[in-house]
Image (cartoon, grey):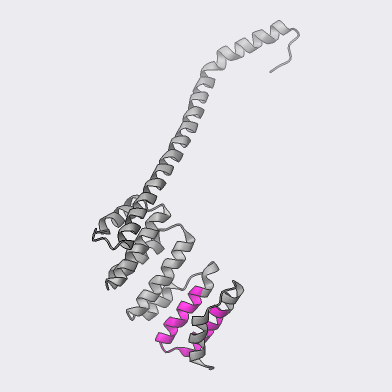
Amino acid sequence: MDNYETEEQQVEAIKKWWNENFKMLIVLTIVGLGGIIGVQQWKQKQLVSSQTASIEYDHILYAIQSGSDTPIEQQVDIMLSEYADYPYAALAAMLEAKKMIADAKLAEAEKKYQWVVANTEAANLKHIARVRLASLMSAQGKNEQALQVLNVEPGSFKATYMETKGDILVALKRLDEARTAYDQALQAYTAIGANAQILKVKRNDLGNS
């Protein structure tokens, strides 16, 4: 605002400025409030969706743990299609995969793990799904493909990745590489303070190169 000689001139200038600009201010205020309300509505919707996904996951978990005959396939499919952005969808897929393995439906279980790897944003769940997928593929004789699944940056899951890689290399009779993988796994387990007794047994069984 410019400087004016008297208070009356200042008041008149303010009145004039308001008359020229009040409509724009009202519009901006409405837009601003609309944005705030929109954000709040979005947050509320996200919260409700997350709670619903959690409840649906609990239903699936209970059905599996209780040995219920209630089919869970449709419930899991709904989770994967409607709540894919939430970790509960990945958890539900891995639960169903575990049940499928118990029912000897290995190909179907493989698809569930593949879905998790391709869709979840939760890095820890993605790593877990990769390791389980690689082990499952190896169990079906797909060892070379299983190694490719593990051919990523493992982050904090290095110990598990290298142990699984060692298992697959043993299946391929590539024992020198398996020893190296197991040694790296042992080092990684030591770094996080894990005991890894079973891995030590597997490594000792291979002897020295």
The residue under the point 41% across, 47% down is 50
The residue under the point 45% across, 62% down is 125
How many numbered markers are drawn?
Answer: 0
- Give residue 32's position: percent from left, percent from top: 51, 29
SS majority, magenta: helix
Position of the N terminus by quadrant: top right
| Magenta-drawn stretch contains 168 | yes
- Bounds of the magenta segment: 160-186
Foreground: 174 or 91? 91
Foreground: 91 or 209? 91
Q: Residue furthest right?
A: 5
The residue under the point 45% across, 34% down is 38
- Give residue 151's position: percent from left, percent from top: 47, 73
The residue under the point 39% across, 80% down is 144
In the rendered image, the vertical position of residue 84 relative to residue 173, given as above or below: above
Q: Residue furthest top?
A: 8
- Give residue 12's position: percent from left, percent from top: 65, 8
Quadrant location of residue 59?
bottom left
In the rendered image, the vertical position of residue 190 relative to residue 31, given as above or below: below
